[in-house]
Amino acid sequence: MSNVIACIDGTSVSTAVSDYAAWASLQLGAPLVLLHVLEKSASPAKSNLAGNIGLGSRESLLEELAALDEKRGKLALEQGRLMLEAARERAIADGVTEPLSRQRHGSLVDTLVGMEEETRLLVMGKHDENLGNHI
């Protein structure tokens, strides 16, 4: 059976997306899937620091940067998990019995293309801050 997919990103429109998707899921009798995509572009661009500092300092700095990137990734995963859990609880309160949660890495467009076969309805919000970045 095809799903109602709700794209959750933590912006102010996420609650409306969750509510409308829950309503559509109930009206269509279709499973609800709450989706959050972690895009690689969310991390800052890496700089080439090779010629700017001494060899020992560079290795130490690169190790620190790698550790920070790892921590940033873990925090983004946890933030996404918490967003999806909040949306799941909201959908249950709206009457959906078993909403599913999915968190993916990559681009939103590629993720949605990969889910095309299982999608009956896609619900996503429009937020001016990032308007046009994904689509």
Image (cartoon, grey):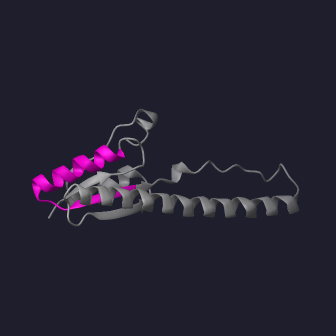
Image point (52%, 58%), residue name: 76
Which residue is outermost to the left?
28
Residue 67 pos. (x, y %): 68, 64
Q: Is 66 left or right of 9, judged from the image as shown?
A: right
Task: Residue 99: tell me if it is visible.
Answer: yes
Q: Quadrant of the C terminus?
A: top left
| Residue 24 lies in the magenta-colored region | yes
Which residue is outermost to the top?
128
Q: Nearer the viewer, residue 96 or 7?
A: 96
Looking at the picture, does residue 92 appear above or below residue 20? below
Q: Quadrant of the N terminus?
A: bottom left
Q: Nearer the viewer, residue 8 or 110?
A: 8
Residue 109 pos. (x, y %): 36, 50
Name the image quarter holding residue 113. Answer: bottom left
Q: Nearer the viewer, residue 17 or 53?
A: 17
Main SS, magenta region, reads helix
**Range covered by the magenta-colored residues:** 14-36
Name the image quarter holding residue 133. Answer: top left
Looking at the picture, does residue 44 appear above or below residue 64? above
Residue 94 pos. (x, y %): 22, 54
Q: Nearer the viewer, residue 52 or 64?
A: 64
Image point (73%, 50%), residue name: 48
Residue 52 pos. (x, y %): 83, 48
Image point (25%, 60%), residue name: 92
Which residue is outermost to the front?
93
